[in-house]
Amino acid sequence: MNRSLKKVLFPLVFVGILLILFWVRLQPSDSTGDRSSERSSQSPLMVHAVVTEPEMFTEHFVTTGSVRADEQVYIRPETSGRVTGVFFHEDSPVNEGDLLIKMQDDDLQQEKRRLSYEIKLAEIRKNRQKTLLERDAIPQEEYDVALNQLNTLRAQRDRIQVS
């Protein structure tokens, strides 16, 4: 069979089969008419029904499982040392800047006291240098050195307070 004949013959056969199926479907059948007459002569159809009443709906269910925390925090100190106090409870909220854990800081407190004494001495020295500078008894450089020493000590104190 040649190709062009196949291309024409197969679609024609397919369309013919579809037309036959539609024609059979559209023809009235005698069996459906008989069944409808049989149903009308029989007793009525029995139905089981339930009357419903409104009631409250609760969105509650019980299940088993495990719960994981939504958020968690790992607290690690920047310096090693012994913890001397814990100032929060588990599952309690904390605010920024709250004291959570206190570590042994005796050496830092001692350094802070030493710096406070040095700052007082440097302030006295700066005030003296300022008085002498106003009288032109010393050069500007000596006053600047005293002021720089005072500012350096204050910076060291601030660094210790942050720790």
Image (cartoon, rainbow, N blue to C red):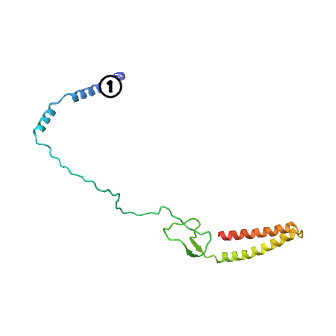
The location of residue 89, given as percent across then percent down, is 50, 71
Q: Nearer the viewer, residue 3 or 63?
A: 63
Left or right placement of residue 143 versus residue 40 in this view: right
Task: Tell me which residue sits at (12%, 35%) in the image.
Answer: 37
The location of residue 108, given as percent across then percent down, is 66, 75
The location of residue 40, given as percent across then percent down, is 12, 37
Q: Quadrant of residue 105?
A: bottom right
Instruction: Label 1: state its secondary structure.
Output: helix
Q: Nearer the viewer, residue 147 or 35?
A: 147
The location of residue 154, given as percent across then percent down, is 73, 69
Of the residues shown, which amino acid type is indicated by label 1? Pro
Left or right placement of residue 29 versus residue 89 in this view: left
Quadrant (top left/top right/bottom left/bottom right) for the N terminus: top left
Left or right placement of residue 144 versus residue 52 in this view: right
Above or below, 145 against 51 in this view is: below
Q: Where is mark 1, residue-wise?
A: 11
Q: Nearer the viewer, residue 112 or 74?
A: 112
Task: Tell me which residue sits at (17%, 30%) in the image.
Answer: 29
Task: Tell me which residue sits at (69%, 75%) in the image.
Answer: 112
Q: Quadrant of residue 19?
A: top left
